[in-house]
Image (tube, rainbow, N blue to C red):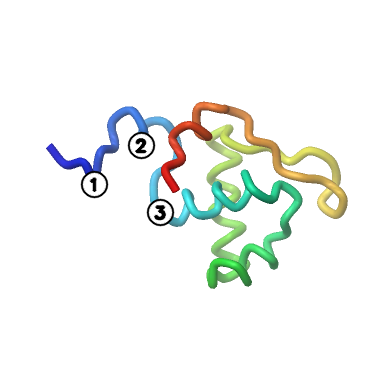
Amino acid sequence: KGDANSKGENGIENGIENEDERKIFSILVETPDITAKKMSEHTGFSVRKINRIMKGLKEKGIIVRVGSDRKGYWEIQDKAYLNSKEH
């Protein structure tokens, strides 16, 4: 009954739960080597909020860090999340 809020197969059970997570996820897809500070500048979120969202995405198995904090990048683990990205 609500296209704007269709959470079933694309939403909550499958990982990305809210617009903030979706925004961070989209940035990671486009720029896997971005820093939390750069994401903060891009989104207007605090670095702390970025880190909290990233931690949640890692815990859900959506993303994983490859390489060091300084020279590494973020890798999307489950390609199904790429397909659920609507923006």
How far, Cα to Cα, is label 2 from label 3?
11 Å
Give the SS element for disc 1. helix
Query: Residue 80 at what x, y percent from top left?
Result: 50, 27
In the visual, does 7 lie left or right of 60?
left
Which residue is under mark 3?
19
Residue sitting at x 84%, y 41%: 67
Residue 74 numbered tag: none
Mark 1 vs mark 3: in front = 1
Which residue is under mark 2?
11
Residue sitting at x 57%, y 71%: 46
- Of mark 2 and mark 3, the one earlier in the sequence is 2
The type of residue carrying mark 3 is Glu
Residue 4 numbered tag: 1
Mark 2 vs mark 1: in front = 1
- Of mark 1 and mark 3, the one earlier in the sequence is 1
Residue sitting at x 40%, y 54%: 19
Query: Residue 57 at what x, y percent from top left?
Result: 55, 43
